[in-house]
Image (cartoon, rainbow, N blue to C red):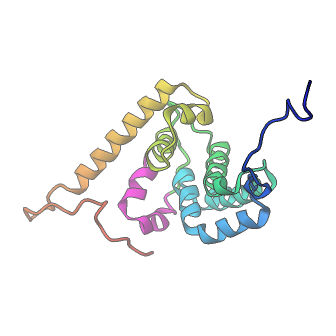
Amino acid sequence: MFKKGMFRKREDGASVSARPTYAAPRDFCRIFAEDKTALYLLSLVLTADSEKAEQCFAAGLEDSIGGNLVFKEWARSWTKRMIIKNAIRMITPAPGRVDRTRQVSDRNVLMLGGGLLTAVRELSPFERFVFVMSILEKYSIQECSILLNCTKQEVSRGQARALQQLAAADLDRTTPIPGTEAPRAAYFLEPARTA
């Protein structure tokens, strides 16, 4: 009456090699080596401090290697997430909180990415995190609110303020240079400067 395996899940056409593979520590080390500049810049723009950025980068590598199992195809996005989570832990951005300890010694480092990094650095910590996470890294408003431990409305307002401030900074940089009628090039178009 009952056949053997009647209540088993059918796996027609499924092979052992089709099982998901997880990223190994060597995969994360390879990603951090290949993407070190981008991951460090992510750390730097979030923390706005070169020492904290180095700590954030190192902690991101440690957490990626020793953390949860991650599908191999998600490993690259997971490394960014670990950088973001460590930066949140270090800076503790919150709506309405102003960063009084912003360092000016990092200005030359931030100029490597052009004026945009400098303008983003000048945002308050909360607006800076919201801008980087939602606009640059394309996290959803919901995901930002969970990671930043705030409401979706606070994230949306923070995003709007960040965009307004960056637009104002862009406008300041495109105003005519005194003594000429030509505006300066928008900082998004300026070539990167080296320190």
Name the residue furthest left. Answer: 181
Q: Residue at x 7, y 62 (%)?
A: 181
Q: Quadrant of the N terminus?
A: top right
Q: Position of residue 61 (x, y in %)?
A: 72, 60
Main SS, magenta region, reads: helix
Q: Residue at x 74, y 52 (%)?
A: 20
Q: Position of residue 22 (x, y in %)?
A: 76, 55
Q: Nearer the viewer, residue 7 or 177?
A: 7
Q: Quadrant of residue 73?
A: bottom right
Does residue 105 appear left or right of residue 10 in this picture? Answer: left
Q: Position of residue 37 (x, y in %)?
A: 56, 68
Q: Which residues are magenta?
A: 104-123
Does residue 78 appear left or right of residue 156 in this picture? Answer: right
Q: Residue at x 54, y 64 (%)?
A: 38
Q: Is residue 189 above or below residue 60?
A: below
Is residue 188 located in the magenta-colored stretch of the structure?
no
Q: Residue at x 69, y 69 (%)?
A: 30
Q: Position of residue 183 (x, y in %)?
A: 15, 60
Q: Is residue 90 above or below residue 184?
A: above
